[in-house]
Image (cartoon, rainbow, N blue to C red):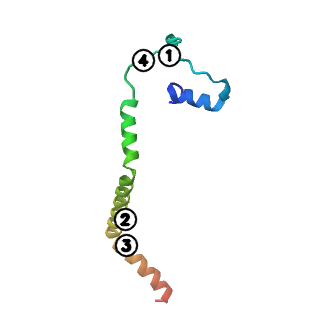
Amino acid sequence: MYRSGPVYLTRRVDCHVPRDQLRVIPWSEDPDYFVHGVGASWHSWDGFVIWNVYNRRHHLLRLAAVVLSVAVIVSVYRNRRSIATCWHNQFSRRSGR
């Protein structure tokens, strides 16, 4: 993912090139080096999805908390007899009955 495009160039410049050795080539000086290739990209839809998930992260966390709470309540309700039996056995051993 980081082997092409502006992210790769930015990381290379930030990590390896001293700022005083950096020179920006103006577009008017030699446009033959750079070509904008228009085409299909997986960034067209995943960037939209990631951005929307990020912007709605608080709502998604609340939704996850509600779903988890409901799952725990349903699980406890469905297993209430086995839980009661387990508690009964544990307390009957302590009291010596």
Q: Earlier in the sequence, mark 1 or mark 2?
A: 1
Q: Earlier in the sequence, mark 3 or mark 4?
A: 4
Secondary structure beneath disc 2? helix
**How many discs appear?**
4
Task: Depth check: give the residue in front, 96 or 46.
Answer: 46
Secondary structure beneath disc 4? loop
Residue 79: name its quadrant.
bottom left
**Relative to 71, 90 lies left or right:** right
Secondary structure beneath disc 3? helix
**Relative to 56, 3 lies left or right:** right
> Residue placed at 56% from the left, 18% from the top?
25
Q: Position of residue 71 (x, y in %)?
A: 34, 62
Q: Which mark is residue 27?
A: 1
Task: Depth check: give the residue in front, 95 or 22.
Answer: 22
How far apart are labels 1 and 3 at the CA level?
Answer: 74 Å
> Does residue 91 lie above or below 3 as drawn?
below
Task: Depth check: give the residue in front, 92 or 78.
Answer: 78
Q: Earlier in the sequence, mark 1 or mark 4?
A: 1
> Residue placed at 37% from the left, 56% from the top?
64
Front tag of 1 and 3: 1
> Does residue 48 lie above or below 70 as drawn?
above
Q: Residues within 10 Å of mark 4 (few under 14, many from 20)?
A: few
Q: Which mark is residue 77?
A: none
Q: Which mark is residue 72?
A: 2
Q: Which residue is mark 4?
A: 37
Front tag of 4 and 2: 4
Front tag of 3 and 4: 4
